[in-house]
Amino acid sequence: MCCRTPPCHQDGVFSFYDHKQFRKLLQEYVPERWPDEEITQRHFQMMAYAGQAILEQIVTNAFSSGVRLSGLKRLVYAGGVALIA
């Protein structure tokens, strides 16, 4: 594995977490909310932060693997995810 989250492999592939692993990962970014607890703006902000942080790690892994596997030094990144990354 080459990065912490999500499970990334040297060839650029990543694996999905099961429910328990993903819940534990989210708790590193967002404090767990009790089922009867009110959902606040802060919860939404922290979930957005967690999603962005995990997505950035996926993209970083994909680019690192692309450079390593292709031998190219310059890659182009475009599309919806590229606009928010």
Image (cartoon, helix red, strand yellow):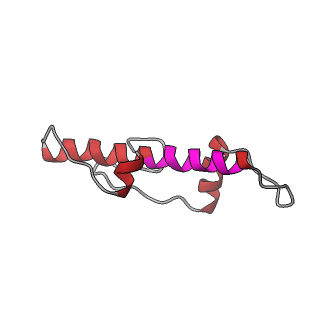
Q: Residue at x 87, y 60 (%)?
A: 36
The residue nearer to you, when weighing 44 against 61, is 44
Extreme top residue here?
A: 73
Residue 75 x/y as whole percent: 19, 44
The residue nearer to you, when weighing 67 against 19, is 67
In this rendering, position of residue 76 left or right of residue 21? left
Q: Magenta part of the protein: which range?
A: 43-55
Where, by quadrant of the figure, is residue 61 drawn? Answer: top left
Where, by quadrant of the figure, is residue 3 drawn? Answer: top left
The residue nearer to you, when weighing 36 against 1, is 36
The residue nearer to you, when weighing 84 against 65, is 84
Whether 20 is drawn above or below 5: the answer is: below
Extreme right residue here?
A: 36
| Residue 81 part of the magenta segment | no
Q: Residue at x 38, y 41 (%)?
A: 2
Residue 18 x/y as whole percent: 57, 62
The quadrant the N terminus occupies is: top left
Residue 80 x/y as whole percent: 37, 57
Q: Residue at x 43, y 44 (%)?
A: 56
In this rendering, position of residue 74 left or right of residue 62? left
